[in-house]
Image (cartoon, helix red, strand yellow):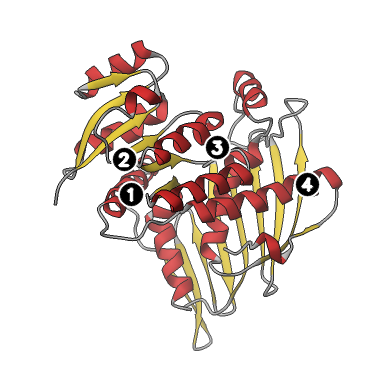
Amino acid sequence: MKKIVLAVVGAGNIAQSVHLPILRRLPNVELIAVCDRNYSKARAVAERFGIPHAVRSTEELLSLPLDAVDICTSTDTHADIAGACIEAGMNVLVERPLARTSDEAALLAEKARARGVKLMVGMNHRFRSDVVLMKNYIEQEQLGRVYYAKAGWLKPHSGDARLRLLAEQHGRGVLFELGLVMLDLVLYLFRATPVRSVSASLFYNTHPTIEDVAIASINFADGSVASIETSWSLVRPDDLFYCNVYGKHGSAFINPFKVVRQLDGSMSVHSPVQHASKVEAYARSYEAELKHFVAGVQGLVPIVSTAEEAVERMLVLEALYQSALQQSEVHLTSSDCVTA
């Protein structure tokens, strides 16, 4: 099968530390270009990774014979760059989030459908080995009906410069930056279960308009519930990324992965040995994600983390912000079509 000819847009940290090293190793990818509005950076990165072309604009990029692009730029540029690439007939992978709003995301989804190209959103946590295991336990009903999930991502202070940049780009903080990841994870695990209502509280400890702590609750149509917490300012000794799900007959936990089940009146605990470090697990999730995108472009597998899912996630996220503003629960209507 012929190689996928691919370019990376954006030469920042995530591209240099994760995407480019992985893509360069994939045998079914021909990496031919790096695009960045800072041409000096694009050229330096291209030379470092042995990539033949360095360009400074999307227009220059689209003159190259490409099958796909991998967009690793700032959130405020995603819609314009992805839209131009889709209209040019390119398959597109966009680092999360797909866009700033549900309307922007819906427009990109429609463009991709109309052009018949693949559009995938980078949600690497779906490809974590522990998340894959957890989802298998849920879908095989080994935990019984899962009715409660609690997930969180708590990190140190993001820095004043970072908060000022977010204020300029889209005016939202930790709920948008980390909460969207946890929301996607919860909805991915609760697949095909409509969201009925949401509520959220936001806290502004280090910036007047950018939230650094967010607590959210999601109520599903079948009565199940999920809670999410994200933070850049909770006083903690270390980072914490976790997701726990509870079913009628058992529970599953990450991170580390563990399954607890009731069997014949006794408790069974399964904790497989995890050989990979947190850094290795992080890198492997991205490698699995990028391999999946390439296989999807080749037509070998259906794309996951679709633009349609991204629209649904953004609708829920916007309802959470509305809830925090109103200080009340927000119900999602059937016209929102929000399912996991």
Q: Tell me the residue that label 2 is attached to.
A: 68
| Depth order, front residue of 253/113 | 113
Depicted 82 relative to depicted 197: above or below: above
| 65 sits left or right of 118 in the view | left
Q: Are marks 3 and 1 in contact (CB under 8 Å)?
A: no
Q: Tell me the residue that label 1 is attached to.
A: 293
Gap in Å between the C-alphas at discs 2 and 3? Answer: 38 Å
Mark 2 or mark 3, which has the lower sequence index?
A: 2
Q: What element carries label 3?
A: loop
Please tell me in which quadrant of the rendered image residue 286 appears: top left
Mark 1 or mark 4, which has the lower sequence index?
A: 1
Which residue is drawn at the image coordinates 29% and 50% (left, top)?
297
Gap in Å between the C-alphas at discs 2 and 1? Answer: 10 Å
Depicted 317 relative to depicted 265: above or below: above
| Depth order, front residue of 153/273 | 153
Q: Where is residue 176 in the image (x, y as percent from the top left)?
A: 63, 40
Which residue is drawn at the image coordinates 39% and 21% (left, top)?
57
Q: Which amino acid does label 2 sit on?
A: Ala
Q: What residue type is labelled 4?
A: Gln
Gap in Å between the C-alphas at discs 4 and 2? Answer: 36 Å
Gap in Å between the C-alphas at discs 3 and 4? Answer: 31 Å
The answer to whether residue 154 shows anywhere in this view is no
Q: Circle 1: is it few (<14), some (14-19), or many (20+) Cα within 10 Å? A: many
Q: Do the residues labelled 2 and 1 touch (CB within 8 Å)?
A: yes
Mark 2 or mark 1, which has the lower sequence index?
A: 2
Q: Tell me the residue that label 4 is attached to.
A: 322
Q: How many marks?
A: 4
Q: Where is residue 12 in the image (x, y as percent from the top left)?
A: 41, 24
Q: Which mark is residue 238?
A: 3
Q: Is mark 1 on a helix, strand or loop?
A: helix
